Image (spheres, helix red, strand yellow):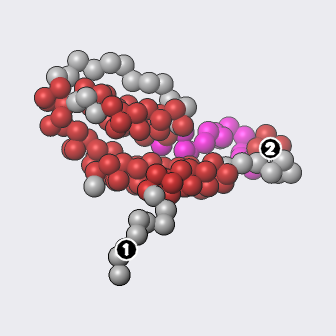
């Protein structure tokens, strides 16, 4: 019995995943805004979101990975990292002066390190929406490694 093409193409599945993630973060309009919700913090304590430092660390890693991919001439991989940086509202990294040959040798090592960092960040995130976003970024990097 011949097997046909898969029912859902990989790109379609990724697109569907992105839509689901985006919809999961939508507001229904009936929820109170975070500014209207009492925080329950004591005077003199910080109300800083603990995920801010996590996102900052992930942005540094994504910027480094984007630079390595760009220097290696891997435009699709660099575009993936730029898209992730944009989703996290980060600034694009500065241009790197690394040579193409050295960069190609570093790409796999950098991508594996980034994948581990994204998995750890997804586990550490206190926000469910951020955890899902970081997990999807980790999956995208993992697919590129395969």
> Which residue does the image show at 13% across and 29% down from the upper left?
101
Per the image, label 1 sits on a secondary structure element best described as loop
Q: Looking at the picture, how far across and down is residue 27, in whole percent?
A: 76, 48
* Numbered disc 2: secondary structure: loop
The extreme bottom residue here reads: 1
Quarter where residue 146 is shown? bottom left
- 45 w.r.t. 75: above or below: below
Q: Position of residue 63 (x, y in %)?
A: 38, 31
The quadrant of the picture occupied by the N terminus is bottom left
**Is any atom of residue 23 visible in this view?**
yes
> Is the C-beta separation of discs 1 and 2 under 8 Å?
no
Using residue 65 as the reference point, say whether residue 9 is left or right of it.
right
Distance, label 1 to label 2, CA atoms, is: 51 Å
- Residue 42 belongs to the span the image colors magenta: yes
Query: Where does the image place residue 17, in percent across and percent down from the top left?
Result: 55, 55
Question: Which region of the structure is painted magenta?
Answer: 38-54
Image point 14% across, 30% down: which residue? 102
Q: Which mark is residue 3?
A: 1
Q: Is residue 57 left or right of residue 12?
A: left
Residue drawn at the location 51% of the way across and 54% of the way down: 12
């Amino acid at each position: 019995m011949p097997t046909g093409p898969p029912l859902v193409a990989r790109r379609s599945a990724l697109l569907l995943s992105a839509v689901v993630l985006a919809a999961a973060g939508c507001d229904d309009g009936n929820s109170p805004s975070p500014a209207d919700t009492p925080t329950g913090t004591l005077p003199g304590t910080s109300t800083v979101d603990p995920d801010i430092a996590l996102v900052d660390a992930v942005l540094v890693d994504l910027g480094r990975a984007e630079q390595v991919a760009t220097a290696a001439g891997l435009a699709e991989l660099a575009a993936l990292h730029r898209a992730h940086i944009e989703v996290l509202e980060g600034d694009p990294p500065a241009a790197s002066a690394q040579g193409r040959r050295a960069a190609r040798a570093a790409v796999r090592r950098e991508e594996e390190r980034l994948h581990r960092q994204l998995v750890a960040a997804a586990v550490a995130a206190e926000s469910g929406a951020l955890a899902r976003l970081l997990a999807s970024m980790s999956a995208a990097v993992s697919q590129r490694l395969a």
